Image (cartoon, rainbow, N blue to C red):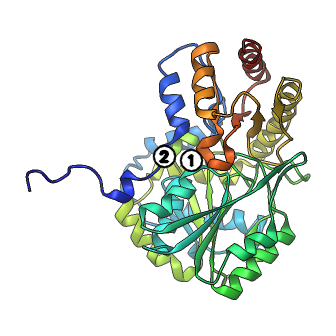
Amino acid sequence: MQNASLAARDAVRQLNISRIREVANAGMKRGDVVAFWFGEPDQVTPEFIRQAAVEALDAGETFYTENLGIPALREAIARYVSGLHRPVSLENIAVTNSGMSALMITTQALVGPGDRVVIVTPVWPNLVEIPKILGAQSVSFPLTFTAAGWKLDLDRLLEVLSPDTRAVYINSPNNPTGWTIDTESQKTILEHCRRHGIWLLADDAYERLFFGNDEGLAPSFLRIADSRDRLVSVNTFSKAWQMTGWRLGWMVVPEELASGVATLIEYNTSCVPGFVQRAGATAIEAGEDAVKDFNVRLKHARDFLLQRLMVLPGVEASPPDGAMYAFFRLAQARDSLAFCKQLVDSVGLGLAPGIAFGPEGEGFVRWCFAASEARLAAGIERLREALNSK
């Protein structure tokens, strides 16, 4: 056995590495990079949220908590979801160490070796790779880029969602494209999943970062589903409440699934730190104005950036309906990974390569616009410099 491999098992070694990190890890060594590669704002978490964590720490909340989360936070999330969509109770809520962990735990609960999972892409790469860790088959279903933005071929998706499909994953508003599914399409997909017993995982991380209505609230499967549907909604405090570093998320699950989720949380992380949960409870109970203000800020930033991108040579883009990204095609980015690495080296600009989000993203780059106008303007000047030097 001395010559046995010390490497990870095949399914892990075959996972695609994050091309976003591949660009960022090199660029982080430089102090002069203007970076827009990660999906996070350039402002710290609001002070009232941070203060709640400080008070919880001062009160000595440093012990283990319940697997599914402290009741105060689960109840706050249940009230929040009920107010936005449809009535849910504490028994439907599971608190997790990040939305990313919620996606992993949901997949562990629902998917096994050989199962078929359909994912609408381009999408944040973790959604495609997570089922593979468990030995499942990831089937990408690509959106189509048009002059009017990204579009879903609904009829074709229904054909792909065959009866042998275990689950379909839909991220809307979408990272990286900003595409947002409409309510009628949601109803059609939900009925199809009901008919064939397909689980539906809704990645709702950006549901409050939507620019298509006065509410600033994207269409949700939760609003049209009932408690017996095979639906899991995954969410996070990272985006709307600007809490990326806190690693706090939640799931809305059918009550029958909750005990299995609790077991998986125990075997993954045991629980979320209590002081982090106190901050989350404060965010969701007292942070509505902060969320709305952030949405307005993002819409202005989107418009500011898109107006300046569209006049650059070789750029094809359309305003995203939601999320916090401009995902645009660039004539000089046919090899988007090489192009983004070159941007770091030549002009100190950090963008995410489109290939990171699937092969249909090749030729595109992603720009997170959750930043000040001054910072966005500085980035535009660096991109202009790079394009003019070609």
Q: In the displayed image of the protein, which residue is found farthest to the bottom?
A: 195
Residue 121 in view, yes or no:
yes
Q: Position of residue 296 (x, y in %)?
A: 84, 39
Residue 226 in view, yes or no:
no
Using the image as rendered, state which of residue 91 and residue 278 is in the foreground.
91
Name which quarter of the figure residue 192 lies in.
bottom right
Q: Is the C-beta separation of discs 1 and 2 under 8 Å?
A: yes
Pointer 2 residue: 56
Q: Earlier in the sequence, mark 1 or mark 2?
A: 2
Q: Position of residue 254 (x, y in %)?
A: 59, 79
Q: Position of residue 17 (x, y in %)?
A: 47, 44
Is disc 1 surrounded by few (<14), some (14 to 19) or many (20+) residues within 10 Å?
Answer: many
Using the image as rendered, state which of residue 370 and residue 50 is in the foreground.
370
Q: CA distance from mark 1 to mark 2?
A: 8 Å
Amino acid of disc 1: Ala
Q: Is residue 266 left or right of 68 when viewed as pictured?
A: left
Kindly identify the residue that appears in the image at 69 percent across and 35 percent down.
Answer: 365
Pointer 1 residue: 279
Position of residue 27 relative to residue 199, above or below, is above
Position of residue 268 relative to residue 363, above or below, is below
Q: Is residue 74 left or right of 132 when viewed as pictured?
A: right
Name which quarter of the figure residue 45 lies in.
top right
Q: Is residue 302 left or right of 163 when viewed as pictured?
A: right
Using the image as rendered, state which of residue 274 and residue 244 is in the foreground.
244
Amino acid of disc 2: Ala
Kindly identify the residue that appears in the image at 86 percent across and 41 percent down.
Answer: 318
